[in-house]
Image (cartoon, grey):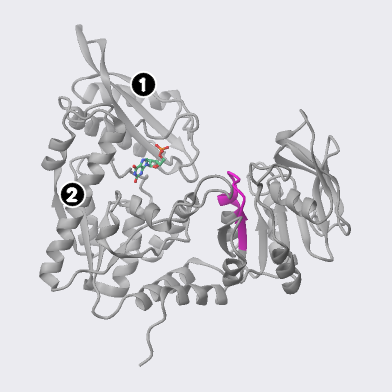
Amino acid sequence: MTAPPTPEAATKAVFAKHAVCLVLDYGSQYTQLIARRVREAGVLSVLLPGDASMDEIREVSPKFIILSGGPNSVHAEGSPLLSDDFFAYVAEHSLPVLGICYGMQLLVHQLGGEVQTVVDSGEYGRMPILVERDSVLYAGEAEAKQLVWMSHGDSATRLPEGFRCVARSEQGAVVGIEDAARRFFGLQYHPEVVHSERGVATLRRLLFEVGGLRGDWNMSDVLQEEMAKVRAAVGPEDHVICALSGGVDSTVAATLVHRVLGERLHCVFVDNGLLRFREAERVMATFEQHLHLPVTKIDVSERMLAKLAGVSDPEQKRKAIGREFIETFQEYADELKAKLGHAPRFLVQGTLYPDVIESCPPPGTSAKHSHTIKSHHNVGGLPEDLKFTLIEPLRELFKDEVRQLGRLLEVPEGFIARHPFPGPGLAVRVLGDVTQGGALDTLREVDEAYIEAIREWGLYDQIWQAFAVFLPIRSVGVQGDQRTHSHVVALRAVTSSDGMTADWFPFQPDFLRYVSTKICNTVRGVNRVVYDVTSKPPSTIEWE
Ligand code: XMP
């Protein structure tokens, strides 16, 4: 009998089946977006740090390479550069390379041109450029003038031999270059952001017409491939555990693994006393009735709240919650070991692509986090000595791709479209001590009234995340001719694509009036409602 393929072999098989566009990350805040635009074009994108070794690059066997932007200048000491081996590899395989911003400056600098820092005259923000329509980069464009999103201090002032300038800014800076024969391309602006109106069209033209890629990567393939990887990794006698949070990521990951392993998957849902209104009931009902996924519910709310009593510091709260989670999880694993006769060897996690990207800081900045540390962080910081092999079927996906996968797995729509909810739950939404008189119950009622109102007004799907925050202060009010001295709650609603940056949601005044009246009229002990109008940065989405 032949041994089943390892997950690494299964990953290689995916790379062999689909042409890969490799994105080398030099630390731009937009790198994720580049990877994402490529995937939206139906091309499998793989992201590696800019200082990835040639062995790592060869393993991916890319058909197209994009060099991202980044905060560095090619002239700064220690800035990441491309190796001679990289250029030899690209020439040997005749690979198209697109450099964006810092990526373009790398090409210019390393192929014999000149990049200069033009003091006090960088170009930032949305601005018009003029493109040459007889070029490869802009072939078929209807207009020579385009609006693009620029963000650079350095500029290419002399091009390497073989290159031509095919786009300029109004100030005359070189913003688009190509060497069609060697298939090197460079853009000084960011084609991946929505503010660059023809940017995605340019990217697609390069991928399909220059790179010859087909756009044949889709979610059903991903589902089949990820199921095959689970089948390959888990032996016939092995058991697998999964901590469900009630969120879309862990639910989709568990449902996928359940399709392959059936009752050898053991799910646990921990009620930590910090959940939303009737959350535990709702989640358990969805798992049992709709997903037919057996879940053990463990109620540690009393234990948890006892440990949190008197703790006000946000970090200490998170740590206490993490420790309690680990203890509960360990107890569950021990119980299973006693029941099955041997310990489960695998742990399913809903780690997403942005989590993986976050763990790859740009070269030359901080030390790389290991994949394990970041993944464990997802379920509340599981320690190394739990000794599980991780199964992470969503590792290559963004949130909305996970939602698509969930639909293929017939996860109920109401579940798929849920706003994210943080692991430490309402503890980061009651400022200060979570056990202060009735705070959690008040917050649950306010939050429920707020979310209900958002749904009634048809706004839920336009918002990335909405929630209420309990403030540890009281304000004076007047209700029914009586002076009150009651609680203040803050409402937050943000739009975002990945939670890394966010903007506050512009509710109409009528909605705000409706919801504040509803809350003050229906929730005892609240006499004031405020709305948070801060973006991230400078704030974070959660208040703690
Ligand atoms: P912040 O507040 O950092 O949050 O802007 C960004 C996104 O992450 C969620 N969040 C967490 N999720 N454990 C989690 O599982 C946490 O400790 C945690 N803190 C924040 C937050 O709800 C938002 O979606």
Quadrant where the N terminus sits is bottom left
Q: Secondary structure at mark 2?
A: helix
x, y (%) of residue 123?
74, 34
Percent across and percent down for residue 379 are 30, 52
Q: Residues within 10 Å of mark 1 (few under 14, many from 20)?
A: some
Which amino acid type is shown beneath numbered disc 2?
Glu
At label 1, which amino acid type do we have? Answer: Val
Residue 418 x %, y %? 35, 48
58 or 208, which is in the foreground? 58
Residue 99 showing in the rendered view: yes
Label 1 sits on a secondary structure element that is strand
Q: Ligand 1 near label 1 (Cβ, under 8 Å)? A: no
Q: Which residues are magenta?
A: 22-34
Label 2 crowd bin: few (<14), some (14–19), many (20+), radius 10 Å: few
Q: Is residue 42 left or right of residue 439?
A: right
Q: Is residue 32 magenta?
A: yes
Q: Is residue 329 above or below residue 387?
A: above
Residue 490 lies, in percent from the top left, at 34, 25
Residue located 74% across and 43% down the image: 75
The residue identified by callout 1 is 530
Q: Which mark is residue 281?
A: 2
Tell me the distance, in whole angstroms, between the alpha carbons under discs 1 and 2: 30 Å
